[in-house]
Amino acid sequence: MTKPLAGLRVADFTVHAAGPFCTHMLAQLGAECIKVETALRPDIFRKPHAVYGRAGPATFDQVASGKLSIRLNLKHPDGKALALRLVEVADVAAESFRAGVMARLGLGYEALREAKRDIILTSISSSGQTGPDSHFAGYAPLFGAWGGLGYLTGHADGPPVEMRHVMDHSVGMNAALATVAALHRRRRTGEGCHVDVAAREVASSLAGEALVAASAGQEVTRMGNDDMRRAPHGLYPTRDADRWLSIAVSTDAQWAALAQVIGQPGLAGDPRFAAEADRHANRRQIDPLLEAWSRGMNGEQAAEQLQAAGIAAHLSWSAADIVADPHLRARGAIVDVAETDGTRRAAVGLPARISGSADARLERGTPELGGDEEYVFGELLGLSSAAIAALVEDRAIY
């Protein structure tokens, strides 16, 4: 069996996180993804990133796993010419610069179409390729803030929450889906196309119900962990530091069961909490009762007791919990790959399985900068060793 996108090739000009996560998804599905880089201006995430509490490039190691790497100086005429030759043997080109940057480099959609008529170009930017705001640059916190998702996230008595990689990865996943749709369209029609993904629009698409409510004149505010209907509904402390128990009660029967588990069966008949609407109206009186019980409990054991009673409950897992989970390991959702320095680490796999296809698992780790040039320039593009050496000497390959 082969992977679903086996046989397809991606010329990957993306940088940072949102664009690389798109091509990372395509690579896991089997596409050969060739990351175009340059030592003149390395991807910022290939560098050590102290904000994540480690010396190594954690983000890059995630979104570059499974890809090939070549160096090209796109501002050099011969570098640009090689980029166009790469597009000739590719099915998809992907980029995540500001709108207009690729065109100024001589690598816009029309130029790529001249190289390959049915090429699909996926462009990922802050606000899209057209419109009055298309010139804006942006990173993940801007996408979430400008798209409205940040405003909706957080507690009612606190400020909006900065959205980071969850925003980048949501943009990348949407871009990967749009790219696969474009490939399907090309298979039907023979036509390539330009896929234009605006990151702030992805954020807004994730807050659709809030936009509908606002358009109907309703005030939309931050809710923290509240639910519009259910109570109790939230995260509760356990006896272990920073281990939080998630509990959601939907029915009267679940409320009665919860009262039994926490040793207060009389709560089931308390008129303040008798029906769903009553519990929701008086939810601030419920939370201290639950916290008094949960603070003395081991989180895992508390979750098991609640689940056995038919109540939706689970620990809010940390990254360490996820990496060690035997279920995710068995499914290949968490795999071990090599970092840039050769050490092994856990990585997140594709969150889908497709029957009749090979598992979309990562099979190689992070590529070294320019580590696949012999294959790409030599085998794919047919350059001799002498020609490659001359291009390196002239810094077209750099």
Image (cartoon, helix red, strand yellow):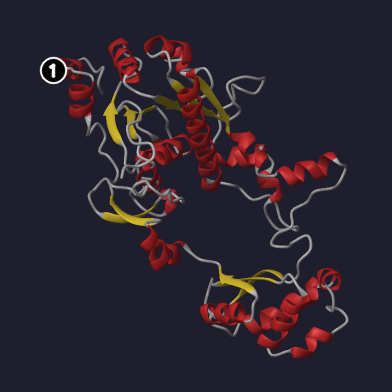
Tell me if mark 1 has few (under 14), some (14-19) or many (20+) residues whose alpha carbon lies within 10 angstroms of its own. Answer: few
Asked whether residue 96 appears in the rendered view, the answer is: no
Closer to the camera in the image, 189 or 382: 189
Position of the N terminus by quadrant? top left
Give the left or right position of residue 15, taking residue 369 as reference. right
Q: Is residue 393 above or below residue 143?
A: above
Q: Is residue 319 above or below residue 70?
A: below
Q: Percent position (x, y) of residue 385? A: 12, 20
Q: How many marks?
A: 1
Q: Secondary structure at mark 1?
A: loop
Q: Quadrant of residue 277?
A: bottom right
Which residue is rendered at x = 83% and y = 78% of the image?
Answer: 273
Q: Percent position (x, y) of residue 69? A: 28, 32
Closer to the camera in the image, 353 or 107: 353
Which residue is rendered at x = 24% and y = 48% of the image?
Answer: 341
Q: Percent position (x, y) of residue 340? A: 27, 45
Q: Is residue 176 above or below residue 40?
A: below
Q: Quadrant of residue 346?
A: bottom left
Q: Which residue is mark 1?
A: 384
